[in-house]
Amino acid sequence: MTADATPALVEDKHAAAGPRVRKASAYPRYLAGKVAGAAVSLLAVLVTSFFLFRLIPGDPVKTMTGGRQVSAEQLAAYREEFGLDLPLWRQFTDYCGKALTGDFGTSYQFRAPVVDKITEALPNTLLLTGTAFVLYTALGIFLGTRSAWRHGKLGDRVNTGLALTLYSIPSFWLGLLLIIVLAVGIGPIPGMFPTGGMESGGKEGFAYVVDVAHHLVLPVVTLVAVEYGQTLLVTRSALLDEMGSDYLTTARAKGLRDDLVRRRHAVPNALLPTVTLIFINLGRTVAGVILVETVFSWPGLGGLFYQALSVPDLPLVQGLFFVFAAAVIVMNTLADLVYPLLDPRVAR
Amino acid sequence: MTTTTGTGLGPRALARQRRRASVARFWRQYRSERAGLYGLTALALCALLALFAPLFVGSDVSSVTDAPGRPMQSPSAEFPLGTDQFGRDLLGLVIWGSRVSLLVGLLAAVLSVAIGTLIGVTAGHFKGWYATVMMRITDWFLVMPTLVLAIALATVMSRSLTTTVVAIGVTTWPTTARLVRAQTLAVETRPYIERARALGGGHWHIMSRHVLPNVMPLVLAQTTLIISSAILAEATLAFLGLGDPTVVSWGGLLQDAREAGAVSAGDWWYLVPPGIAIAVVALAFTLCGRAVESVLNPRLGVSR
């Protein structure tokens, strides 16, 4: 990081790199490169998701019939229905061709198109991860800033210690504990929250919103607790890097209040590395939500993935694997695209 | 590197002496990291407990058939942590489980770091198409959601400890590879590498004698950090029922607890100990790793 480079030095580098005209055209080319890279990654994920799950031992047709007595003709009919009678390379080309048009086949266990199952569960996952994401990012940045500003003091030590501890806790364990204490209730503590699911049913309008929010509390608290630590630590060390900079001394010498120096001068610069992390975290949270959704029986993508794995329901697993990996790839690419707009030194 | 042998020592003895001195310097600096010392102490205790577990608990602690207590007893003088659904002593199980959790965490981290170091050093040393291909593969693994890939691998293979180790090791190496490659590139620009090459040192000689010792400190810090996430990953896989069902591990105990209905019955004493064990060990490794990191690279400022 050239965090302490003065603006004058940066200008000099631009001048040395070439005429200003070239600089203006750098971003589109950078953008095209990043998008092409992301497309290649997505294709690679598509290929992997096909071959990886073919390695699962066992006959998918046998699993589908669930051990019932089925005649050989029926088995053959099943195989034909799901295209399992074709040679592997034909299955692969069919799979890729269909996937490119957004068709991931039919789920074995639900007998419904995979795309329908995914679009059904996606909003629930987005609601859960979105809420948690906004909260843990805000909390991480807020506490990280405070921690760095008073680094070495007791408050900072407590803050980082707590963040590291929560970061080391398995999310599913924290979820189970919260269920026991706050949903089931132990001793004098009554059960205040539902143990799982997303709604109690039979509610409409405003009551429905309140009901869903009530169900949302525990899973969101779990996610926030295990995720905010990383944002806090990155914000803190980025801000500490900035603290010694000359421009902060200048700002203070101008007579600005401490609070203004921090808010207007130090934090905006320190947030640059945090932006990358925020996007990457969002992608990771979507994938990491598998555990929390399983523990809280939240009807989202993660819970669906767990159900699909235990069958194993090949088309559904493939489709979900693709969605999870795509979420990470898209978020990484977005981080790459936004970053140079915030920090022009990158896209030269 | 100095070439003076004025003290009368041979080159080997000299190198040994220098190495001892740098270890001593490292330890001096490490001691000033308070959090790192806490982590190290906790780890030493856990390691001793795991090593000497057979002295406290018999190997029949996980036997379902001759369990000492009644099912699901809450903590008492006889069973300080209570019993599980088969009447087995939970304290004994948690102690016994430390063996598997620590072993799998260590092995998976070693596998992961070994792959990462191998790919990082070679990709930094051999430039050209080899490096391009290797870094493409690394980037591809880097964008994969690690947990999802590990779950997928564990599903595909049979349920065993080897599977867990491989699933974690194969999915977590890319960060190490990137770090090691960057360090290799930096080391290879130094003049003594050129000297070694001019004296006829081959690829193997340069990589093993000059590059590897220089990336080792980084690898050490990385290993400590990865062990902590490997232990968490092991617990996660076991909790999802993808671990070896025949052994006792902390993640497996949590899965047992959930399946036995400990959650809805409010039997918190069944769930709390294995989770605390996981968190303590993972935290201890993280603290050690951060301390090593800040000794090696004070500019990182993690613990300033």
Image: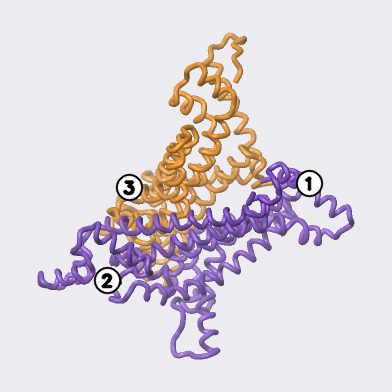
Chain colours: A purple, B orange
What is the number of the mark on residue A271?
A: none
Comparing labels 1 and 2, the label whose residue is closer to the camera:
1
Pinpoint the chain carrying mark 1: A
Q: Residue sitting at 35 percent across and 56 percent down?
A: A47
Residue B290 location in percent, x, y? Answer: 59, 45
Question: Where B243 falls versus B8 (above or below)?
Answer: below
Measured Cα–Cα span from mark 3 to mark 2? 30 Å
Using the rendered view, name the quadrant where residue A139 is placed: bottom right
What is the number of the mark on residue B162?
A: 3
Comparing labels 1 and 3, the label whose residue is closer to the camera:
1
Is residue B20 rendered to the left or right of residue B171?
right
Residue A301 location in percent, x, y? Answer: 42, 70
Q: Give, as a three-letter code, the residue at label 3.
A: Thr
Q: Residue sitting at 57 percent across and 58 percent down?
A: A335
Pointer 2: what residue? A108
Of mark 1 and mark 2, the one earlier in the sequence is: 1
Pointer 1: what residue? A8
